Image: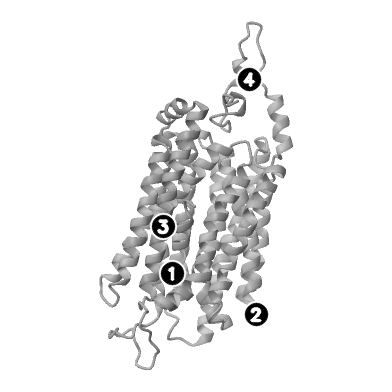
Amino acid sequence: MLTFGSYFCFDMPSVLQDKFQGNPCNMTNNMTDINSTCCNDCLGLAPDEYNLLYAIYAWTNAVIVIAAGFLIDKLGNRIGVFLFSGLCVLGSCSFAAGAFLKGTSAMLPIMLLGRLLFGAGNGSLTIVQNRITAFWFKDKELAMAFGITLAFSRLGSVLNFLLTANFADAYGLTWTLWGGSVLCGVGFMSAIVVSFLDIYGVKQLGQDANLKLSSKNVKVGDIKRFSLQYWLLALTIMFFYNGIFPFVADASKFIQDKYGYKQTSAYMAGAVYDVSMVLSPFLGGVIDVFGRRGILAISCAVLTIPVFGLLGFTEVHPLVSTLWLGITYSVAAASLWPSIPLVVSQATIGTAMGLTTSIQMVGIGLSNIVVGQILGNTEKIPRLDTLLRWKYVMIFLLANVLACVVTAFFLNMVDRRRGGVLNASRKEKLASQQVATPVSLPDGRLDAANDEATETDPLLPNSRQPSLN
């Protein structure tokens, strides 16, 4: 539940895109045509201004999460979880307050400030959540644990797409945005519970002092020692998400413009997250047993290519494409993100997660800007020209997926040459661990050459953890 509310808030503009971009009846500037329709609850944002709401979120993440990841590794999960969940609450409140300034020049800057603060908190909060998960489930059901946390996060996204539009029609845009802020407050309360549970668990293991010592040894220069596997993994994540998030942000409007579904467009766009919420925990459990993370990464990218072809060049029902995209996204998320703890040391997981999120958000931010520039103002141009612009958008998203195929291919090549840690199954990992078991010397000491910690060793290997029995 830590990121349930923030995931709910993230895509609220997508569900309410009509209200964000619709012409308000009280606006008197040249954006409102006399013959055009208007609504009392609309904000009157241009398409490029609307996409800027997503771009500034991504840019903030790109800058903040690197420092946030290092800060979390240095100061610990407990400080990070309070700080970043608090920023989510503050950002969502500022965003909602901006809607009160509808029709004024201050509205957009205040809403952008809210998205900036929200972006600084949400991306970093996800890093804390992943770091906590990686600590407690390393060498256990790691992918399944990641999948369950993602499922609860995506539950927020799913409920957003299912409920937000109807809630806005009943109670208005402003109160709907404030409702999202309340859910971020629920996340802050969850942060308190998570912090106490983490403190209790670490004390039970007797590892509080070890964690503090490891945190003191973390340095910014550790980034230089990240392996080529890590960098290729980060690029693979970036290019894949460049095709997913910018599409979901504009999917509701796209479905309306091309297919004419007005009332159900948000539900169809949200199908991507519906599938993810259902499949992620089960896929995580399967991946934990069978491995093949690198192979799944390239397979997902290849299987995503037809999705944008269908959307851009055919009249196939959009739900087919969004469900299809939801499946490939679910498999990619369950295989890519849990791979990061396998290619970096436990002490630098926060830094690695932060840097990966930064790279991802740089790509998404630029993609949102490109999509906004391609679309321009589609309200006052012929329908055929609007559809042509959407076709160019799909080609751009397709290009990102093709780039993902390339990076995933090289990722598998490098991983194979370095022991195949990403594609190893649970059985293969256990066999390799038995081979690497430390050898006892005649004086009773362990052979240091065999017991030396490696880049992929957990901070608390199972063989070194004190028994709780």
Q: Single out the residue that lies furthest toward the front.
A: 469
Q: Amino acid at mark 2?
A: Glu
Q: Single out the residue that lies furthest toward the top.
A: 443
How far, Cα to Cα, is label 3 from label 2? Answer: 39 Å
Residue at (59, 37) in percent of width and height: 138
> Mark number for residue 233?
none
Q: Which residue is mark 1?
A: 13
How far, Cα to Cα, is label 1 from label 4? Answer: 54 Å
SS class of the residue under badge 2? loop
Q: Which residue is mark 2?
A: 315
SS class of the residue under badge 3? helix
- Dots 1 and 4: beta carbons under 8 Å? no
Q: Amino acid at mark 1?
A: Pro
Considering only order in the chain, which callout, 2 or 4, is on the residue closer to the N terminus? 2
- Dots 3 and 2: beta carbons under 8 Å? no
For disc 4, the neighbor class at 10 Å (few under 14, some 14 to 19, many from 20) is few
Image location (x, y in percent) of residue 89: 36, 56
How far, Cα to Cα, is label 4 from label 2? Answer: 61 Å
SS class of the residue under badge 4? helix
Q: Which residue is mark 3?
A: 184
How far, Cα to Cα, is label 1 from label 2? Answer: 26 Å
Tell which of 380 and 34 is nearer to you: 34
SS class of the residue under badge 1? helix
How far, Cα to Cα, is label 1 from label 3? Answer: 16 Å
- Dots 1 and 2: beta carbons under 8 Å? no
Q: Amino acid at mark 4?
A: Asn
Q: Which residue is mark 4?
A: 450
